[in-house]
Amino acid sequence: MYPGDNVEFDELDAVRLCAYWDAKKNQSWRLPFHRNEGLEIGFVSNGSVDFSADKNSNKFTRLTSEHVTVTKPWQEHAIGNPVLTASKMLFLIIDFGIRRPNQGWEWPDWVVLSDADKREFSKYVQNTNLTIFKSNNKLKAIFEELFKIVDENNISESISVLSILFNRILLELLSIFRGDSNDYSSDSPNINVVKCFLEQLESYCHEDWTLASMAEDCGLKTTRFTYYCKLLANSTPMTLLNRARLNRAKKIIEESDPNEGISITDIAMNCGFSTSQYFATKFKETYGHGPREYFVKFHGIENRRLR
């Protein structure tokens, strides 16, 4: 994906990637929705690319050198719609030890931001729903220096310079964050923690969730977790869990091959239901047809059965 040599950033612990692509023409591929194990900072110096961090609406934004992207480890994002366009784009991924919004940040020793700046930076990133920000001339100049170092494959001899550049990027981003017109000072981070959990629930609905385990995953007590679920979705956590499981089951049936049978039991287990009977009952209550009938109706076939 990123041609070049693998480099161990021993003295720049937590740096997972510092690389770029330079596509002179439109490609036949794209980066589909994915997550990274770290905070990803992206910058397009030449050309433009389509970027999205909204999988539900699949809405893309055209990025240019006027933008910088910041995506969190729990945020799915994609580049290219439908393919990657001619562009030169650099990615910096720093792993702060966070995988969920409620986790504490582990700042590497080479980061020289003050404790107050670190708290402000992490709090903003934790609370904002934004992923695209307006770049500035200072940030553009820093990225150009990074391009040059990576292009010359001079990483091992440039650790001190890279450390300074990475710190400057963090400081410039903090300055950009401070210019955000939204005031997050009084917002409870718990709202965004639960919002993030609910957005991803369908992907993890097959797990053996209980009210207590869902609340624990968000770092909350059950009563507070339930309160935020009702505030955000006007439903109880268990109702939202069942809804996610049924929606996932519906997608599996719709995406199945009509020429091949699909086991109702397999679908039930894949979506977290304890029994196929309970799954079939709830599916019919929700969609008006049992899983078998829905399969036949959706694919427009007759006398086709699921195992």
Image: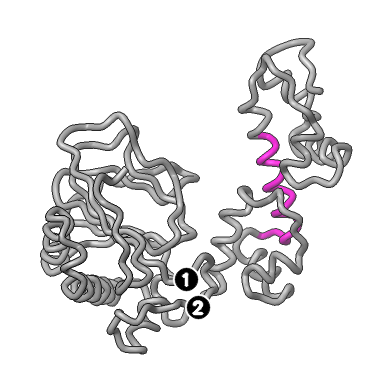
Image location (x, y in percent) of residue 64: 19, 50
**The N terminus sits in image quarter:** top left
Q: Which residues are magenta?
A: 234-250
Residue 226 position (above or below residue 84): below
Residue position for label 1: 97
Q: Quadrant of residue 233?
A: bottom right
| Relative horizontal placement of residue 28, taking residue 244 as reference (left or right) | left
The majority secondary structure of the magenta stretch comes to helix
| Badge 2 amino acid | Gly
Q: Residue at x 32, y 63 (%)?
A: 8
Point out the tag, 2 or 1, that comes first from the N-terminus.
1
Image location (x, y in percent) of residue 13: 36, 72
Q: Residue at x 24, y 48 (%)?
A: 4
**The C terminus sits in image quarter:** top right
Q: Kindly indicate whether the residue at mark 1 contacts the one at mark 2 (C-beta within 8 angstroms).
A: yes
Image location (x, y in percent) of residue 157: 16, 68
| Badge 1 amino acid | Gly
The colour scheme applied to this rendered structure is one colour
In this view, the mark in front (2 or 1): 1
| Relative horizontal placement of residue 192, taking residue 61 as reference (left or right) | right
Q: Does the stretch in magenta take in 243?
A: yes
In this rendered view, identify the residue nearer to me: 202 or 148. 148
Residue position for label 2: 104
Label 2: how many Cα within 10 Å (few below 14, some 14–19, many 20+): few
